Image: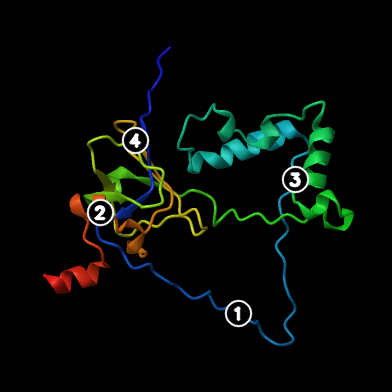
Amino acid sequence: MTSTVRARFAIVACLATSVTALSCAAAPVNPGTAGATPSTTPSAPAPATDAARCRQVLASAAANPPLYAAGTTWNQPAACLGVRADSTRWSTNWFNSANLPGRTDATQRGAIDLAFDEYSTPVYDARDATANQPFFVTGWGPGDNMGSTRTIPWNPSWRPAGGADQEMIIVDRTTGHEWGLWGLQQDNWSSCLTLANLAGGYRPGKLDELIRRK
């Protein structure tokens, strides 16, 4: 049996030159035609068993294979894992105690906000990088484990998750290296305005400002 060792690098960083975030408007909603009769497309029948559902999900995942090993628990559909004998106990605990108000107010139980978009970590392929970009650790960050290597693969189109954690991952599938970024500051360049960073070559400001200075 062989195993692959994946090197993980953790970084809290500003890029050497910030990239202005893109924005987009919500897609317009077609109000439809007045008086028109709505039509529906019948959905496929739900699988009758967990085993059937497991096969269905695994088959649909073939078009978008998981990044990490397919056999890891993280990449297993819930339908493929079965139900634990004490599932009711743990699901009840979660329902009653997952939010602070619900622990003392029964009317607040189950009121959970899930931010899958804002706090799901986007993963980018290092093969899509356009350059190796210098990075600098923020003044409030816990540091990094990059050693003497002070650049990361980068593409200006990459964006971290929209939540406050500003997370993203870059993966080199050839070498197995993985760069995990938390608190990525693409616009708030002042977070990296420290004496150590300035001595290391950090030049604060957004990309267009740096170009004008040249």
Residue 117 drawn at (x, y percent): 55, 56
Residue 48 drawn at (x, y percent): 78, 38
Circle 1 is placed at which residue position? 30
Task: Give the amino acid at mark 2.
Answer: Leu
Circle 4 is placed at which residue position? 145
- Which label is found at residue 46? 3
Side of 101 relative to 79 (left or right):
right
Colour scheme? rainbow
Residue 181 drawn at (x, y percent): 40, 46
Side of 175 relative to 31 (left or right):
left
Residue 151 vs residue 139, the one in the foreground: 139
**Residue 108 picture quarter:** bottom right
Circle 2 is placed at which residue position? 195
Query: Mark 3 to mark 2: distance in Å?
Result: 60 Å
Residue occupying the far right of the picture: 106
Query: Mark 2 to mark 1: distance in Å?
Result: 54 Å
Which circle, 2 or 1, is nearer the viewer? 2
Task: Give the amino acid at mark 4.
Answer: Asn
- Count residues near mark 2 (Cα–Cα under 10 Å), then give few for <14, some for 14-19, many for 20+: few
Find out whether the residues at labels 4 and 2 contact each other: C-beta distance under 8 Å. no
Quadrant where the N terminus lies?
A: top left
Query: Mark 3 to mark 4: distance in Å?
Result: 47 Å
**Residue 85 picture quarter:** top right
In primary-sequence order, the first of circles 2 and 1 is 1
Residue occupying the far left of the picture: 214
Q: Element type at marker 3?
A: loop
